[in-house]
Amino acid sequence: MTGTEMMNRALILLGYTDSQGSVSAEQRFKSRAVTVINTVYADLYFTGKQREELKPIKSLSDEIRLSERALNDVMPYGVAAYFAMSESDGDQQQIFARLYNQKRTASETANKIVDVIPYPEG
């Protein structure tokens, strides 16, 4: 997924669209997008225990290299939270920050294997 695709997903989640439901990626969003995306990218990258060095995106056409789950289920909410914060949209920022943190925590614990086979005690 590219930076542009991630920016568009976040803006759609926030409802920052035109009357047709299309993203009107104004310059104010584009100018902040790389920084916002890299902030969330670094958080998820190191949470995922990657072994390679993080290579932040330099333009919106660069690919974001995370798992499909992180890209589709977690990252858009973090990017949306930062965009809302940059727009002084406190209500949306709180909602999306909470969702992002819940989804990030769930994705971390979903990959852990837990012994669930019961065994008799004694």
Image: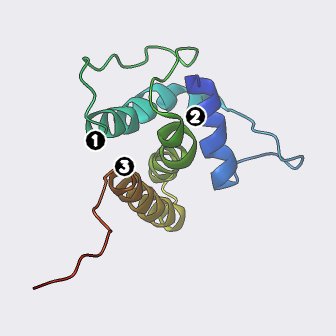
Where is the N terminus found, in terms of image quarters? top right
Say which label, 2 or 1, has the lower sequence index: 2
Q: CA distance from mark 2 to mark 3?
A: 34 Å
In front of the other: 40 or 84 = 40
Say which label, 1 or 3, has the lower sequence index: 1
Q: CA distance from mark 2 to mark 1?
A: 26 Å
* Residue at the farthest right position: 20
The local crowd at label 3, few if under 14, some if 14 to 19, many if 20 or more residues have their Cα within 10 Å, is: few
Please name the residue that numbered disc 1 is placed on. Answer: 47
Q: CA distance from mark 1 to mark 3?
A: 12 Å
* Residue at the farthest bottom position: 122
Please name the residue that numbered disc 2 is placed on. Answer: 29
Please name the residue that numbered disc 3 is placed on. Answer: 111
Horizontally, is 112 left or right of 20 in the view? left
The local crowd at label 2, few if under 14, some if 14 to 19, many if 20 or more residues have their Cα within 10 Å, is: some
Three-letter code for the amino acid on which mark 1 is drawn: Thr
Horizontally, is 30 left or right of 51 in the view? right
Say which label, 2 or 3, has the lower sequence index: 2
- Where residue 34 appears, as percent x and y from the top left, is 46, 25
Discs 1, 3 touching: Cβ within 8 Å: no
Question: Which quadrant holds residue 105?
Answer: bottom left
Q: Is residue 33 above or below residue 117?
A: above
- Where residue 22 appears, as percent x and y from the top left, is 81, 40
Question: Which residue is drawn at the image coordinates 63% and 54% (left, top)?
Answer: 14
- Where residue 19 appears, as percent x and y from the top left, is 87, 50
- Where residue 100 appears, as percent x and y from the top left, is 44, 56
Question: Which residue is drawn at the image coordinates 27% and 63% (left, top)?
Answer: 115
